[in-house]
Amino acid sequence: MKAIYNNSTIPEREAKIRYHFPENIMMENAAAALEKLVLDLTEQMGLDSDSKVLIVCGSGNNGGDGYALARRLYGRVKVSVIAIAEPRTFESIQQCKMAKAVGVDVTSTSDSSLIRLSDMIVSGANIIVDCIYGTGFHGQMPEASEKLIKLLNASSALRIACDISSGIDEDGNCSPVTFKADYTVTMGALKSALFTDAAKDYTGTVSVADLGIAGSVFDKCGTADAYLIEASDVKLPLRKKRSTHKGCYGHTVVIAGEKSGAAIMGATAAMEFGSGLTTLYKAHNSNLEQFKISPELMIAQKIPAKTTCVVIGSGLGNLPMTLRNEFTAWFASAKNPSCVLDADMFGYENLGSLLTQLNGIEGARIVLTPHKKELERLLENLSVETPEELVAQFKNVVIAAKSANTKIYAGNKVYVMVEGVQSLSKGGSGDVLAGMIGALLSQGYSALDAVITGTMCHALAAKKLGREDFSLTPLKLIEGLK
């Protein structure tokens, strides 16, 4: 996992003081990281020294990074710079002077001729690097900058953002015109602003520039506000023990209610993701009869005694008191009980009392999987302002807040899973995830580990099948888990 900071200038400032790092060395290392990416991309494109790189510089230190990059690239590629304003910080002034001294062509103007000139330059660029604002952007973007960024976005060139795309503010809000990067090289540490839903279309592939000290050393200079989940954090339910049987891998029960197709998809996903036994519980309002159900799935009208996890809410409809009582009685009697609450459970008006009841049971593992609207309903239902408040109140609850970037709330920590893709935007995707997490809980995972592994594998399976694929269905997604 990698640390994410709401305000990375705090640990950066501390690193400068603690390790005696001057600004120019950090800027040089930032430029070196950008240079490596640019040269790697030109090699991939088969252009090498013939490639044309356009760097657009602002007046602050983000622009200084751009001038340093231009100097380092000069003689290796055909590099040119557009300055949307004269450099004003000491470091950017010095870097501009050095770039000009080695021969870098810098076009410096802020009037309408900039747009005409940049149009000609942009049309021939293979790579464009945005060094306009970085984290310094706030307020309203000047009209000239908007026109220029529109030109940059319209170019067929690969686009790189230095630190963060121009137009994204420190809270991750995006200007109506924002630089659309294919790659972002962020400086020193990951910023929360890079991982908002609004920013997802503008950041591309994000990497961190080492500013001269290892990330593990840098992180000692501040307290992380969240953690980025990586593929290495996944703990697959691989069956390494050879002498084993189905009972070793848990028994997942998925409640099938008003829209039982959702439960069937969740149960199928649970079976596919390692659950030793999987049962569809036929609720009072179930329409299971209209479906062809795989013989792999069992059907019951009560919760089996050796159940290890219950998934409830997917297509459920209403929750009658008889089902609630049966569910809570099982939960209270089971050893290390676990459950996944999904979908219709977030409209259940007595959810607060149910969570209080479940949370008070020793060894409880409770996962909530709301999407954005369901999360709003959940918080309103429980009269809390934030997910952090909710998990502070219910110590055994982990929330997987599904969105373009899924945020996971557990204890006093927040985790971010950014691998989700747009092909998942289809009914049933969430039911599959609920079943996957349920299967992992059944197999003995902690609530947090189940959510981290489940959400990541769910996203990676969809990405493998195609991020833009309009034909991705829940059953294809389940098949993709293989």
Image (cartoon, helix red, strand yellow):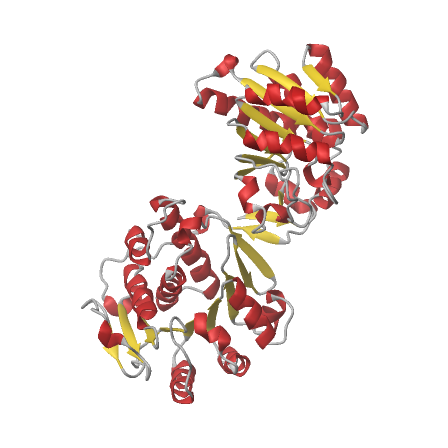
Q: Residue 309's quadrant in the figure?
A: bottom left
Front in this rendered view, residue 278 or 21: 278
**How many numbered marks does the figure carry?**
0
Residue 174 position in % (x across, y down): 64, 46
Whether residue 393 is situated above or below residue 236 in the rendered picture: below
Residue 75 position in % (x across, y down): 59, 11
Residue 363 seen in the figure: no
The residue located at (55%, 17%) in the rendering is 52
On screen, residue 286 versus residue 296, left or right, reads right
Whether residue 90 is situated above or below residue 136 in the rendered picture: above
Residue 348 position in % (x across, y down): 49, 79
Residue 477 seen in the figure: yes
Whether residue 169 is situated above or below residue 83 in the rendered picture: below
On screen, residue 121 versus residue 350, left or right, reads right
Residue 390 position in % (x across, y down): 59, 71
| Residue sitting farthest toward the left | 295
On screen, residue 147 versus residue 237, left or right, reads right
Whether residue 363 is situated above or below residue 224 in the rendered picture: below
Front in this rendered view, residue 321 or 296: 321
